[in-house]
Image (cartoon, grey):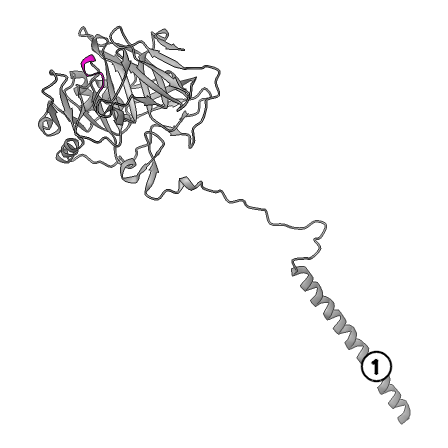
């Protein structure tokens, strides 16, 4: 009996030993599977589950310029303290005796429109006018008031028509007028020229006038930039080549601009020669040209002009890099905006650089000659 019990104990011990080994083997296999699953060189399953690859959007290096921003007027890089401030809108004379104005080359956007007698006036919108002599400065017309208001600009002019006076009041336009009490602070006369073509100003005088009038130099809270700009120079997809554009405002004023393919700019000419800045001696050049066709007509017997665009739309040309595309425009004066649109109805995007805008009667499109 003892012998049978002895053999039973031995047999049970053997069974227990085998069971323990099998249990250890199973545990080793579990550990190995866990290690294999986390291993970098594991064999993937037939249908692996992978996280989607995310490619971060890289911001171009030039989009991270500390202390700079893209100008609302040119789309080019400018210091924050310049680009974030309200621009100036300066009413330049364009009489033959002062055909090469002082400081006009500093305008980022230059408007031209007919006044009485077929003479045109120029409105220079700029965010960085400098110097001791800017001008000559002439009187306001109400449609120039409306243009300046689109840019939330401080308007600099010497005198005004009764229509301009009414528009200044209606739009509550911040302005520096030479025929008001601020005149002697902001303006001076160059006695080498005949009046009324000899009124000039300077940046220092303008700043004193702004301070005295207590105008804000910060943009209003609801201000929106006038233009969209490409980040880089972009050619138009167009078959209409424009190497020269002539804008026949009148027998008195017929400026033209010629394209230079080397620097891809348009050079402006008027009164029989290059249109220059008398301070620098440099010819005016523009990256963009816009011809805005408007319903313009005499407002009274004195040949004063007016434009229907308080809430209006019309056609236009956009020209850059030697090509032209037809575009449209819409303006709402009450809301202080005006926009251009491409043929698809999208807001127009233009090239970075300076822009010349001709406000031209829509009844005379043939007097805008493209060559």
Q: Percent position (x, y) of residue 114? A: 25, 12
Name the image quarter holding residue 291: top left
Does residue 360 appear in the picture of this structure? yes
Name the image quarter holding residue 98: top left
Q: Percent position (x, y) of residue 177? A: 14, 24
Query: Which residue is found at the position 15% from the left and 36% from the top?
Result: 211
Q: Nearer the viewer, residue 249 or 245?
A: 245
Q: Quadrant of the C terminus?
A: top left
Q: Percent position (x, y) of residue 326? A: 42, 16
Left/right placement of residue 102 relative to residue 261 reads: left
Q: Quadrant of the N terminus?
A: bottom right
Does residue 308 appear in the picture of this structure? no
What crowding class fits label 1: few (fewer than 14 Cα within 10 Å), some (14-19), or many (20 or more)? few
Q: Nearer the viewer, residue 129 or 149?
A: 129
Question: On the image, numbered disc 1 is attached to which residue?
Answer: 14
Q: Residue furthest bottom?
A: 2
Q: Is residue 156 magenta?
A: no
Left/right placement of residue 53 relative to residue 76 reads: right
* Badge 1 element: helix
Q: Which stretch did the figure color magenta?
A: 96-100
> What number of labels is visible?
1
Query: Which residue is found at the position 18% from the left and 6% from the top?
Result: 301
Q: Is residue 326 above or below residue 44?
A: above
Q: Percent position (x, y) of residue 95? A: 20, 14
Instruction: Tell me the chief SS of the magenta region.
Output: helix
Name the image quarter holding residue 69: top left
């Amino acid at each position: 009996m003892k012998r049978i019990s002895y053999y039973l104990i031995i047999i049970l011990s053997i069974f227990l030993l085998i069971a323990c080994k099998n249990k250890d083997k199973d545990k080793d296999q579990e550990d190995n599977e866990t290690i294999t699953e986390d291993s970098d060189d594991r064999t993937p399953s037939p249908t692996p589950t992978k996280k989607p690859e995310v490619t971060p959007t890289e911001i171009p290096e030039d989009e991270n310029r500390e202390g700079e921003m893209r100008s609302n007027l040119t789309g080019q890089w400018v210091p924050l303290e310049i680009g974030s401030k309200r621009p100036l809108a300066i009413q330049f004379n364009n009489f033959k005796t002062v055909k090469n104005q002082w400081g006009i080359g500093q305008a980022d956007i230059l408007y031209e429109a007919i006044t009485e007698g077929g003479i045109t006036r120029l409105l220079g919108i700029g965010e960085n006018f400098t110097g001791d002599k800017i001008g000559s400065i002439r009187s306001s017309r109400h449609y120039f008031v409306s243009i300046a208001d689109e840019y939330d600009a401080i308007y600099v002019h010497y005198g005004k028509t009764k229509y301009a006076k009414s528009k200044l009041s209606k739009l509550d336009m911040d302005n520096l007028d030479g025929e008001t009490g601020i005149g002697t602070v902001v303006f001076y006369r160059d006695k080498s020229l005949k009046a009324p073509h000899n009124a000039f100003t300077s940046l220092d005088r303008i700043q004193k006038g702004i301070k005295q009038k207590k105008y804000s130099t910060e943009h209003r809270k609801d201000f929106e930039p006038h233009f969209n700009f490409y980040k880089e120079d972009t050619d138009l997809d167009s078959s209409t080549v424009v190497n020269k554009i002539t804008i026949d405002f009148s027998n008195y004023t017929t400026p033209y601009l010629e394209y230079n393919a080397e620097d891809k700019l348009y050079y402006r000419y008027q009164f029989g020669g290059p249109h220059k800045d008398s301070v620098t001696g440099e010819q005016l050049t523009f990256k963009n040209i816009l011809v805005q066709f408007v319903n313009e007509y005499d407002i009274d017997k004195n040949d004063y002009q007016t434009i229907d665009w308080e809430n209006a739309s019309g056609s236009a040309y956009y020209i850059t890099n030697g090509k032209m595309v037809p575009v449209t425009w819409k303006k709402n004066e009450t809301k202080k905006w005006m926009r251009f649109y491409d043929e698809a109805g999208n807001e127009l995007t233009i090239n970075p650089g300076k822009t010349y805008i001709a406000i031209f009667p829509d009844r005379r499109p043939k007097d805008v000659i493209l060559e």
